[in-house]
Amino acid sequence: MKRVVVGLSGGVDSSVAAYLLKEQGYEVIGLFMKNWHDDSVTISNECPWLEDSNDALLVAEKLGIPFQTVDLSEQYKEKIVDYMFNEYEKGRTPNPDVLCNREIKFDVFMKIAMSLGADYVATGHYCRKGTIIKDGKEVYQLLAGKDNNKDQSYFLCQLSQEQLSKALFPIGELTKPEVREIAAKLDLITAEKKDSQGLCFIGKVRLPEFLQQKLQPKEGVIIEIPAEADIYNQEKPSFTSEEEEFAFESRRIDYLKVPGKVMGKHQGAHYFTKGQRKGLNVGGTKEPLFIIEIDVEKNIVYTGQGNQHPGLFKKALFIANDEIHWIREDLALKEGEKMEVMARIRYRQPLQKATLHQFKDGMYVVFEHPQSAITEGQFVAWHWNDEILGSGVIA
């Protein structure tokens, strides 16, 4: 009998995942991960993890499976929180949920599960795993969940073949309403529970306040760049190579020399992210202001009016070699090769037509249509049909 450790989060998805595994004849152990208890960084006095671990315990009792809590807050702080602050200080915007899966659930947590003699680790993610045989070897595929509305494969875009070989996603074939229905039939306490929002670890904390407790505020200016600025209407230079052209398409525009208008003040450029609209507290413009660029060195936030402002759009992005990750290692591009794919630069974005071009120092993702708010530090993931082939950190 194969043993599976399921990450019980105290939510409905992982509860039903545990039930399905038990039905399929696995020996199931429930494990709750406690990831955060730094009382110096909280906003609310609600303590979501206590309530969640209690719900997870009640679910385990109901399903008749052994349950324990593991405290991963040390590893969490080091691998996720510290990384996030470093990225924000550099003016990049990390994705803690993608990292949490790569570094915690399918690494630290997986090692604990294996030490308990588990064959697999299971989570309540809406995605599926496929297995194909290629050149006599088993190759694992990460596939989108059946529920288009809830597909969470993007958050797992950094997993490796090794991690996938030991992963199970029991609810990947179901839709959210079906999952809730199963939980209601079983009378599980989590059946009606709302989906958790926000960071996968800090519960009810809002990110800017979280950052403000760690990154020192420093006052700077908010500048508006007009949509008709010359920089957007210059003729394209002529290029001697594709690589040169893509570098131009994906470049950061230096707005220091572009005439703009001071619109207000901010408390630190590192609190903001590209494409952001809320939180600027600047009024009086015809259309809302969107952030088009952040200069952390000079502490300036550049904005433009409206979501069609030319400063928001780019046709290409770059990924440095050490930040390219192929789930399908067998399909990895060699220098000079290219591949047509469908790609997305954020969770829930509809897939976009793009071409990957691998060069000596890294890879360009060149989109058929310009994309809004391509953000450094976020992940771009690329697909064939409903399979994620790989992902990378936007440079």
Image (cartoon, rainbow, N blue to C red):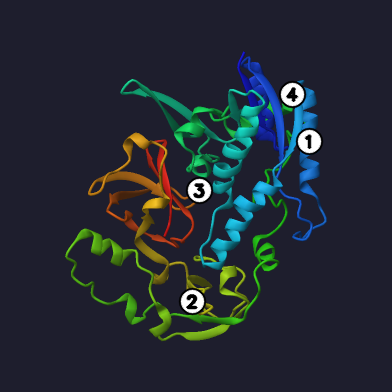
Q: Is residue 140 above or below residue 309?
A: above
User: Mark 3 Cα within 10 Å, few/some/many (few <14, many 20+)?
Assistant: few
| Residue that mark 2 sits on | 302
Q: Counting residues from the N terminus, which is met first, the one under dot 1 or under dot 3?
A: 1
Instruction: Please state which amino acid type lies under the numbered disc 2.
Output: Tyr
| Residue that mark 1 sits on | 55
Judged by depth in the image, the label closer to the viewer, 1 or 3, is 1
User: Mark 4 Cα within 10 Å, few/some/many (few <14, many 20+)?
Assistant: some
372 left or right of 333 in image: right
Query: Percent from the top left, x then y, of residue 31?
Result: 71, 32
CA distance separating discs 1 and 3:
28 Å
Instruction: Please state which amino acid type lies under the numbered disc 1.
Output: Asp
Q: Counting residues from the N terminus, which is met first, the one under dot 1 or under dot 4?
A: 1
| Residue that mark 4 sits on | 186
234 left or right of 24 in image: left
Q: Which mark is residue 244?
A: none
Q: Quadrant of residue 136?
A: top left
Q: Is residue 146 above or below residue 23?
A: below
